[in-house]
Image (tube, grey):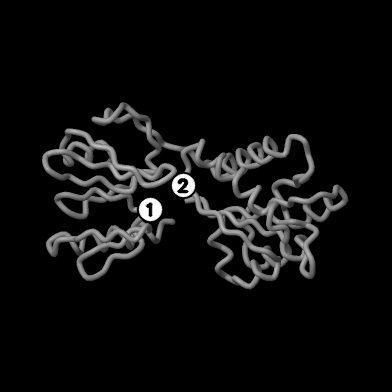
Amino acid sequence: MFRIAICDDEYYFRQELKEIISDYMRNKGLIFQIDTFASGEDFIALGIEMVKYTIVFLDVNMNKMDGVTAAKAIRTISKEIFIVFVTAYVDYTLEGYKVDAIRYLLKDSNNFKSTISECMEAVIDKMNYTVIKKVFDFNESKREISLDRLLYIESKLHKLEFHIMEQKLKIYTMYETLNDLERELRGYNFLRIHQSFLVNLKYMNEVFRYKTILSNGIELIIPKARYKQVKDSFIAYQGEI
């Protein structure tokens, strides 16, 4: 999942930038979360928790703590966060190089939306991030889906239910066996936690008391016979990311 922070003291610009980035991420089939912050102080107050963000968009000209100062504070915590400066002025480019900013974007540019897209492409390229898609012949329609958007598959009443995050959570069905899907998705971080559930490890937040809680709050039961293997697989996956 891409976690993105937008730090800008202009409310309307925060919302505009959030919408542009959200459209880009959805069109690419990427799973993401965007949090907004009204000041540099608010973001820096996260401390070590800043490292959970892949990218931070910083307005250079904020009141009190400006974007450059915030960027320097970020770099004391992490060298890996991608920093993007966004501003209405062109006279801070050198400061961007000092904190290894990946891009410097002008708010009032006529092609602002396309520069955001190019910026995101550059970040994804540096991360060597590839979107893995597969075509499934659902009962509703034949669709190509990003495996990043597939939360889990449930076997129910002789058919499979695919729980997929699009604009909102949607369910598509297919007449197939879960054993076949488990083989097809082997190597893509899907875990069989139950005879009826094949779950994307990316969305498992917790494993305890013979159940797992997914990132959207759904609870799925884990049988006692599978519990240790599921718990060990979950811990191993958490150690890899």
Q: Residues within 10 Å of mark 2 (few under 14, many from 20)?
A: some
| Image depth: mark 2 or mark 1 in front | 2
Q: Which residue is mark 1?
A: 202
- Image quadrant in which the C terminus is located: bottom left
Position of 223 with respect to 11 (left or right) is: left
Which residue shows up at 40% across the image and 61% down it?
239
Name which of mark 2 and mark 1 comes first in the sequence: 2
Q: Furthest residue to the front?
A: 12
Residues 208 and 80: in front is 208
Q: Furthest residue to the right?
A: 91
Q: CA distance from mark 2 to mark 1?
A: 10 Å
- What's under tag 1, amino acid-wise? Lys
In terms of secondary structure, where does tag 1 sit? helix
Residue 139 position in % (x across, y down): 24, 30
Which residue shows up at 30% across the image and 45% down it?
163
Asked whether the beta carbons under mark 2 and mark 1 sit within 8 Å of each other, the answer is yes
Identify whether 131 is placed above or below 75.
above
Which residue shows up at 17% across the image and 54% down it?
194
In terms of secondary structure, where does tag 2 sit? loop
Residue 145 position in % (x across, y down): 38, 35
Q: Residues within 10 Å of mark 1 (few under 14, many from 20)?
A: some
Quadrant housing residue 214: bottom left
Position of 86 with respect to 148 (left or right) is: right
Identify whether 198 is placed above or below 229.
above
Picture mark count = 2
- What's under tag 2, amino acid-wise? Ile
* Residue 118: image tag: none
Q: Which residue is mark 2?
A: 31
Which residue shows up at 77% across the image and 61% down it?
68
Position of 1 with respect to 198 (left or right) is: right
Residue 195 position in % (x across, y down): 14, 50
Residue 78 position in % (x across, y down): 62, 63
